Amino acid sequence: ERLHRWEDALNAYRKRQLEDHNNSYELTLGKLRCLKALSDWRTLYKISNDIWNTDIYQNMNSSAMKTNIAPIAISAAWNLGSWNSVEDYLEHMKPETAEFHYYKGVVSIHHKKFEKATKHIHHARSVLENDLTALIGESYNRAYSTIIRLQQLTELEEVINYSQTNQESRKKQIYHMWNERLDGYQKDISIW
């Protein structure tokens, strides 16, 4: 995982579970992280839901388990358009995190509650800016995902702007800007 060799890591987790007949929580979390990095939304969603809706890990505190799985599983639910699951996962995420406020903003936009979305976007940005200050001192590569998330917050604001404007010329301008921006990102699926 640390080397970002996600398929190799996923295969190693699967192999270890088969060899040891071990369905440990840590191995499953590792698999979920790999599936997220590989954007295998359907598999991630299925495994997350199976865990979420059963007592497969009876030795785990259910609330703690859901708090750990929710930030991983929510991306699959969102990418598959499963809005009810997104909202279920949000209930178990830590509310002080940028990711929580990012997804609250996304859900608010989905429900066309743009003022509420804007508040969540600003809160997420505040948390990320604090994180960025520490990360940028370490290295650009460590800070890159935070920079991308800040950019995504800006794009959420643009979605709000796009949704609220009645000017076709403004909508075309925003659309053109999005396409140009995509061309400038690193060609890394974990960023997109």
Image (tube, rainbow, N blue to C red):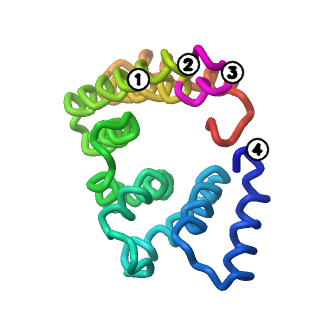
Q: Work out whether mark 2 precedes mark 3 in sequence or the reverse, and give the earlier one.
A: 2
Q: Amino acid at mark 3?
A: Gly
Determine whether label 3 and label 1 are within 8 Å by CB.
no
Q: Which residue is mark 2?
A: 177
Q: Which residue is mark 4?
A: 3
Given residues 26 and 123, the one toward you in this image is: 26
Q: Position of residue 62 (x, y in %)?
A: 32, 70
The residue depicted at 63 percent of the width and 27 percent of the height is 142
Given residues 175 and 3, the one toward you in this image is: 3
The CA span between labels 1 and 4 is 34 Å
Q: Amino acid at mark 4?
A: Leu
Nearer to us: label 1 or label 4: 4
Q: Position of residue 140 (x, y in %)?
A: 66, 19
Q: Amino acid at mark 1?
A: Glu
The CA span between labels 2 and 3 is 11 Å
Q: Secondary structure at mark 2?
A: helix
* Residue 183 within the segment the image draws in magenta: no
Figure check: 143 above or below 101: above
The local crowd at label 1, few if under 14, some if 14 to 19, many if 20 or more residues have their Cα within 10 Å, is some
The CA span between labels 1 and 2 is 10 Å
Q: Position of residue 81 (x, y in %)?
A: 43, 56
Q: Which residue is mark 1?
A: 158
Relative side of 22 to 160, left or right: right
Relative side of 175 to 52, left or right: right
The CA span between labels 4 and 2 is 33 Å
Q: Work out whether mark 3 precedes mark 1 in sequence or the reverse, and give the earlier one.
A: 1
Determine whether label 1 and label 2 are within 8 Å by CB.
yes
